[in-house]
């Protein structure tokens, strides 16, 4: 329900507010909020509605799509694509990864080359395991939920609807087919 609530609130965002610095070679369209002390580097493309907190580093050369909320002290780096995601404070995806329709808890680190997949190829809605049973999320696109302090090794692929509990980790190149609990 966090993604639905985030979408609902961001759809109501009116206008832009830039308190940080945005490089002249970055592109911002639609309503975008950039917090104090945040730096948006060259080549970054941000399509609102997007809210970015304070003291973040965005880019260079990243693509942030609508319905994304980024907390304070986050890093969205080189070659990143982010869509419809929630980053809690201190979450980082520094380079060459995809984060779609996902929730990243406080202090999460997404290793380079990682993919948080968000779509089934058969077009069905995403199901996620809750208390041992598969529950239909009702969402055609739903990525991962990464608990506080979770760390993904480089080139990790997380299948749609998977959850990683706080402080869990993956190995480089790991494919997460089932939830990882602590």
Image: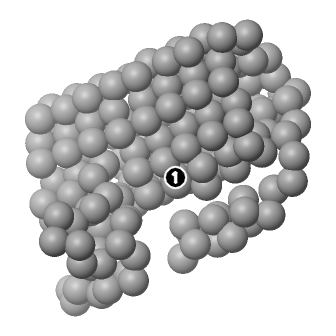
Residue 91 versus residue 63: which sits nearer the camera?
Answer: 63
Residue density around tag 1, few if under 14, some if 14–19, many if 20 or more, within 10 Å: many
* Secondary element at image label 1: loop
Residue 67 versus residue 127: which sits nearer the camera?
Answer: 67
Residue 154 versus residue 21: which sits nearer the camera?
Answer: 21
User: How many discs mark residues in the rendered view?
Assistant: 1
Report x, y in % for residue 111: 31, 30
Describe residue 154's horizontal placement relative to residue 86 as left or right: left
Rendered position, 104 above or below 155: below
Viewport quadrant of the C terminus: bottom left
Which residue appears at 71% of the width and 36% of the height?
A: 29
Rendered position, 146 above or below 32: below
The answer to whether residue 166 shows anywhere in this view is no
Way the structure is coloured: one colour
Viewport quadrant of the N terminus: bottom right
Query: Residue 65's image quarter?
Result: top right
Which residue appears at 21% of the width and 66% of the height?
A: 120
Report x, y in % for residue 121: 17, 64
Residue 2 versus residue 46: which sits nearer the camera?
Answer: 46
Report x, y in % for residue 156: 20, 39
Report x, y in % for residue 117: 27, 53
Q: Look at mark 1 in the image and give the residue it sits on.
A: 85
Which residue appears at 43% of the width and 56% of the height?
A: 102
Rendered position, 76 above or below 152: above
Describe residue 177's horizontal placement relative to residue 88 as left or right: left
Which residue appears at 52% of the width and 54% of the height?
A: 84
Describe residue 123's horizontal placement relative to residue 32 as left or right: left
The answer to whether residue 98 shows anywhere in this view is yes
Query: Residue 51's image quarter?
Result: top right
Rendered position, 177 above or below 148: below
């Amino acid at each position: 329900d966090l993604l639905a609530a985030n979408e609902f609130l961001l759809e109501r965002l009116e206008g832009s507010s830039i308190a940080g610095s945005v490089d002249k070679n970055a592109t911002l369209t639609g309503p975008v909020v950039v917090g104090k002390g945040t730096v948006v580097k060259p080549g970054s493309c941000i399509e609102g509605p997007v809210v970015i907190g304070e003291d973040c580093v965005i880019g260079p050369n990243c693509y942030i799509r609508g319905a994304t909320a980024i907390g304070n002290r986050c890093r969205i780096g080189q070659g990143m694509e982010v869509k419809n995601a929630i980053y809690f404070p201190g979450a980082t995806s520094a380079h060459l990864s995809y984060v779609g329709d996902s929730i990243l808890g406080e202090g999460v680190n997404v290793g380079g080359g990682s993919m948080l997949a968000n779509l089934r190829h058969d077009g069905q809605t995403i199901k996620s395991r809750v208390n041992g049973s598969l529950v239909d999320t009702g969402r055609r696109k739903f990525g991962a939920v990464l608990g506080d302090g979770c760390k993904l090794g480089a080139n990790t692929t997380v299948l749609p609807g998977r959850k990683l509990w706080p402080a869990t980790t993956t190995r480089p190149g790991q494919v997460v087919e089932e939830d990882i609990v602590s």
